[in-house]
């Protein structure tokens, strides 16, 4: 093959694209009910936006970002995630000055240079929701509940894990305690974690390597180090989740791979995807708006991995609908084109077989394309001024005397 899609980048052609559409429309319906409005954000930004927000020390910035210089000499990155752009837009457009709180959602492609595998692509799609200006743990619970609603509506089974990773007050204490503990076990950690030890020790907590998991079991728990404010926020969050009948598991090792999180973090995980188990994740990021130049603004959000969710969503059985017009001869073909046009004007799905092949071939196409009816215009029909309407699922055929009758019949 002379031309191929770039490694890790996949086309979605029908029926996968239909499944994609189903996932996206379900997401939109659910979050719109929660008062969220759509934002359309650029897919590339200045690279330093992500270095600043996602974090210099994260794997995303260190190893996975697509960075290039454009013709104007700017250092550009294809966005590896959506939150940074949302915050940048929120600050740049001065939204905070007009709205006491803001709820946004977005859908679109993200880019990370990772080893491609099932459900992990270099161009992948996320549907995300962000809330700005609210600090109550009630909104955390509500956002988590909406996330769960999206997955439930898609019949994706996933378990929810929550944790609190504290704030600027309490996290440094925990970090210190963790470093003291890890230092003694350093030789037991994997190569990546030895590196993380100095630049991002919290990430050791969610390493997937068996040896590291053993070490981590005995590590101090962040929840034992939370300051009063963080502890109360976390307790309230759990209370509100129970109020909303959201089942969850506390996981004190849950930290997420981005630097900007504070207090609440959560993940929905599926056991049907092997190691790639997280299908939706998010948390609070109370300092990010300020860090990107805005006023002090509490915020939180989540993002769903559409590609992974698609692996868990069952194929939609398409319903038969519409009218496929089958003709023989030029005069019938012309009549057929008029009929198709009329049906479309009336809001019905309709096509004509432009190949004008045998009746059999045309009928086969009508069936393959999942039309409900085939409308036959042959010599006999033309001569006597009627149509034959065949219902494809039953094979039942009836005589239709006029266009008016046809419209009434449909
Ligand atoms: Zn705290
Ligand atoms: Zn490790």
Image: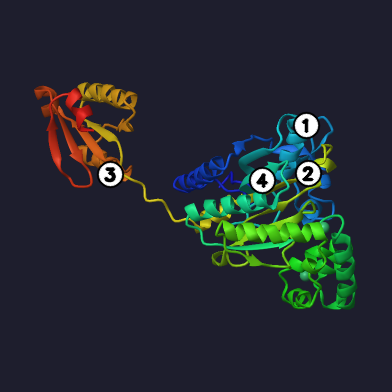
Lower sequence index among marks 4 and 2: 2
| Coordinates of residue 157 in the picture (x, y in percent) | 51, 62
In front of the other: label 4 or label 2? Answer: 4
- Is label 4 in a helix, a strand or a loop? strand
Q: x, y percentage for residue 59?
A: 78, 56
| Residue placed under numbered mark 4 in the picture | 110
Residue 57 figure quarter = bottom right
Residue receiving disc 2 = 67
Residue drawn 77% across the image and 66% down it: 223
Q: Is residue 189 visible to us here?
A: yes
Q: Position of residue 75 (x, y in %)?
A: 82, 38
Q: Quick one: label 2 or label 1, which is nearer the N terminus?
A: 2
Q: Is residue 105 above or below residue 228?
A: above
Q: Is residue 299 left or right of 126 when viewed as pictured?
A: right
Q: CA distance from mark 4 to mark 1?
A: 21 Å
Which badge, 4 or 1, is on the more N-terminal residue? 1
- Give me the C-alpha separation between circle 2 and circle 3: 48 Å
Which tag is nearer the camera, tag 3 or tag 4? 4
Q: Classify mark 1: residues with Cα within 10 Å, few (<14), some (14-19) or many (20+).
A: few
> Crowding at label 4, few (<14), some or many (≥20) Cα neighbours within 10 Å?
some
Q: Position of residue 361 (x, y in %)?
A: 25, 41
Q: Is residue 242 left or right of residue 52?
A: left
The reply to whether the residue tagged 1 has its Cβ within 8 angstroms of ligand 1 is: no
Residue 178 sits in quarter: bottom right
Give neighbour class at mark 2: few <14, some 14-19, many 20+ (Cα, 10 Å): some
Q: Which residue is mark 3?
A: 367
């Amino acid at each position: 093959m002379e031309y191929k899609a770039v490694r890790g980048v996949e086309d979605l052609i029908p029926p996968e694209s239909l499944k994609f559409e189903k996932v996206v429309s379900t997401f939109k319906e659910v979050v719109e009910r929660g008062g969220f409005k759509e934002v359309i954000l650029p897919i590339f930004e200045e690279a330093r936006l992500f270095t600043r927000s996602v974090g210099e020390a994260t794997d995303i910035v260190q190893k996975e970002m697509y960075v290039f210089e454009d013709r104007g000499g700017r250092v550009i990155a294809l966005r590896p995630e959506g939150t940074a752009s949302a915050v940048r837009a929120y600050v740049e457009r001065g939204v905070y000055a007009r709205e006491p709180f803001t709820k946004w959602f977005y859908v679109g492609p993200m880019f990370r240079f990772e080893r491609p595998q099932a459900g992990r692509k270099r161009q992948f799609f996320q549907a995300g929701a962000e809330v700005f200006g609210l600090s109550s743990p009630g909104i955390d619970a509500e956002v988590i509940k909406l996330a769960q609603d999206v997955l439930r509506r898609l019949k994706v089974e996933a378990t929810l894990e929550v944790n609190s990773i504290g704030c600027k007050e309490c996290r440094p204490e925990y970090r210190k305690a963790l470093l003291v503990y890890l230092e003694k076990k350093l030789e037991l950690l994997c190569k990546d974690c030895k590196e993380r030890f100095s630049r991002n020790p919290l990430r050791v907590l969610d390493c997937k390597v068996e040896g590291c998991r053993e070490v981590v079991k005995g590590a101090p728990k962040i929840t034992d180090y939370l300051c009063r404010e963080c502890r109360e926020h976390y307790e309230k969050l759990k209370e509100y989740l129970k109020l909303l009948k959201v089942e969850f598991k506390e996981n004190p090792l849950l930290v997420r791979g981005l630097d900007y999180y504070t207090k609440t973090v959560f993940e929905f995980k599926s056991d049907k995807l092997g190691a790639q188990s997280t299908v939706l994740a998010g948390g609070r990021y109370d300092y990010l708006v300020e860090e990107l130049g805005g006023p002090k603004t509490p915020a939180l959000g989540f993002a769903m991995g559409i590609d992974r969710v698609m692996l868990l969503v069952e194929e939609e059985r398409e319903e038969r609908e519409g009218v496929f017009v089958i003709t023989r001869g030029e005069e019938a073909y012309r009549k057929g084109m008029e009929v198709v046009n009329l049906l479309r004007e009336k809001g019905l799905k309709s096509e004509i077989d432009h190949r004008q092949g045998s009746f059999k071939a045309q009928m086969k196409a009508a069936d393959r394309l999942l039309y409900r009816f085939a409308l036959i215009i042959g010599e006999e029909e033309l001569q006597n001024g009627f149509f034959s309407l065949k219902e494809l699922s039953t094979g039942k055929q009836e005589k239709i005397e006029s266009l008016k009758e046809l419209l009434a019949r449909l």
